[in-house]
Image (cartoon, grey):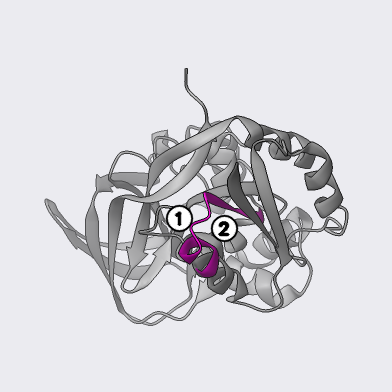
C-alpha cells in the first residue's frame, strides 16, 4: 500500500469539481493506494499542502486542476522523493497534454493504477519555478488579461487574443547565454520545458522535459495577414518551421528587456524585473508515468 494525495483546485477550468472525490473512490485501486483528498482554499495553498504530504513521505501528490495548479503542487515537491501526478481539469492543460495524460477525468484516475515514478526537469526564472513554459511578450499580455477577465475556458482566451493582437507592439530584448548573444525586437519569447502553452498549441514542438534543456521560441514581428497561417502551424506542430520563429536550445540563459513588462509562469502572470536568469534543473522533479515493462 502506498499513500496518494489528491489536491483539487475548485476554481480550475469550467467543470464542477464536487463529483471528483466520488470518482476517485470508485476508480482508484484500493489494494494499491491509500488516498487523501483535499480542496485548496487560496492561492499558494496547494504548495503548502504538497510540502506537508512530501514531509509525511507520500508516494505521490496528484494535482487536480490546470497548469497553475500543477505549478503550485510541483513547487512543493521539487527535490523530494514524492512524485507529481495530474488529473487535468484546467483551461489549457499543457503539462498533461505534453505527457499524454487523458483529459477525461475517469480515464486519468484509472491510469494512476498503473504508474511508476519517473524523473523530469523543471525550470527556474530567478527564484521562481516553472514546469511547462514561461515567457514575455504577447502571450504574457494575454495571460494577464485572461486572469483579469474573471471567466475561465478557451473561449475567454481566444477573445483576449482577438482583442489585443492587432494593437500589440513588439519589444526589444537581449538574450545572452553559452554561444548565444542576440538582440532583437520580438512579438513574444517563450522558454519551453514542455512543448506547448496548452490546448495543443505547440510553440516548441521538439521540447522535452527530460532532456536537461529548454527550447526558446523567439517570434519576430509578422504581417497580421499571415496570423491565421501561424496559428495553424501551432496546432500542426510546424511553428518552428516558420521564418518568423527562431528556436534556440540551451540549459540556461539571461533575458534583458527594457521594461518590466508582463511575464508569465505556466500561464499565470507574475511581476518580474528587467533582467531574468532562466535555467533548467535537470531531473529535479519526480513524476508519475505509465509503467514500462
Going from the N terminus, do you reach mark 1 or mark 2 first?
2
The answer to whether one can see residue 227 in this image is no
Q: CA distance from mark 1 to mark 2?
A: 8 Å
Residue shown at the point (45%, 60%) measured from the top left: 77
Q: Does the residue at mark 1 contact the one at mark 2 (Cβ under 8 Å)? A: yes
The image position of residue 155, as x and y in percent, is: 78, 56
Q: Determine which quarter of the picture holds residue 53.
A: bottom right
Is residue 181 visible in the rendered image? The answer is yes
Residue 159, image quadrant: bottom right
Residue at 88% across, 53% down: 19
Which residue sits furthest left? 179
Helix, strand or loop under label 1: loop
Residue 247: x, y in percent? 32, 44
Where the N terminus falls, by quadrant?
A: top right
- In this view, the residue in front, 232 or 35, is 35
Front in this rendered view, residue 228 or 175 = 175
- Residue 70 has which mark? 2
Q: Is 82 part of what is drawn in magenta?
A: no
Task: Measuring from the top left, give residue 292's x and y in whole percent.
Answer: 47, 22
Q: Position of residue 145 (x, y in %)?
A: 65, 73
Residue at the spot x=69%, y=35% of the render? 31
Magenta stretch: residue 61 in it?
Answer: yes
- What is the span of residues highlighted in magenta in the rendered image? 52-64
| Label 2 SS | helix
User: Which of 183 and 60 lies nearest the eye of the viewer?
Assistant: 60
Which mark identifies residue 30? none
Image height check: is 117 above or below 73?
above
Nearest the eye: 127 or 84: 84
Query: Left of 169 or right of it: where is 224?
Result: right
- Residue that badge 1 annotates: 131
Amino acid at each position: 500500500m502506498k499513500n496518494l494525495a489528491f489536491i483539487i483546485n475548485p476554481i480550475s477550468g469550467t467543470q464542477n469539481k464536487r463529483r471528483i472525490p466520488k470518482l476517485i473512490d470508485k476508480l482508484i485501486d484500493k489494494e494499491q493506494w491509500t488516498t487523501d483528498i483535499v480542496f485548496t482554499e487560496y492561492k499558494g495553498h496547494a504548495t503548502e499542502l504538497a510540502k506537508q504530504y512530501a514531509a509525511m513521505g507520500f508516494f505521490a501528490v496528484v494535482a487536480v486542476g490546470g497548469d497553475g495548479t500543477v505549478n503550485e503542487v510541483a513547487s512543493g515537491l521539487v527535490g523530494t522523493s514524492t512524485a507529481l501526478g495530474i488529473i487535468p481539469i484546467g483551461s489549457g492543460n499543457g503539462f498533461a497534454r505534453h505527457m499524454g495524460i487523458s483529459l477525461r477525468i475517469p480515464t486519468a484516475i484509472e491510469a494512476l493504477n498503473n504508474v511508476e515514478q519517473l524523473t523530469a526537469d523543471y525550470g527556474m526564472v530567478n527564484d521562481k519555478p516553472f514546469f511547462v513554459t514561461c515567457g514575455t511578450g504577447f502571450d504574457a499580455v494575454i495571460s494577464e488579461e485572461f486572469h483579469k477577465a474573471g471567466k475561465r475556458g478557451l473561449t475567454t482566451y481566444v477573445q483576449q487574443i482577438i482583442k489585443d493582437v492587432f494593437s500589440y507592439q513588439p519589444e526589444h530584448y537581449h538574450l545572452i547565454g553559452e554561444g548565444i548573444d542576440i538582440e532583437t525586437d520580438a512579438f513574444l519569447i517563450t522558454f519551453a520545458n514542455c512543448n506547448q502553452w496548452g490546448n495543443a498549441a505547440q510553440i516548441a514542438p521538439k521540447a522535452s522535459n527530460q532532456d536537461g534543456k529548454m527550447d526558446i521560441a523567439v517570434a519576430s514581428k509578422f504581417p497580421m495577414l499571415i496570423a491565421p497561417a501561424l496559428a495553424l502551424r501551432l496546432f500542426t506542430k510546424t511553428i518552428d518551421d516558420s521564418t518568423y520563429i527562431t528556436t534556440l536550445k540551451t540549459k540556461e540563459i539571461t533575458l534583458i528587456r527594457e521594461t518590466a513588462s508582463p511575464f508569465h509562469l505556466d500561464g499565470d502572470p507574475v511581476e518580474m524585473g528587467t533582467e531574468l536568469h532562466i535555467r533548467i534543473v535537470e531531473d529535479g522533479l519526480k513524476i508519475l508515468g505509465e509503467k514500462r515493462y
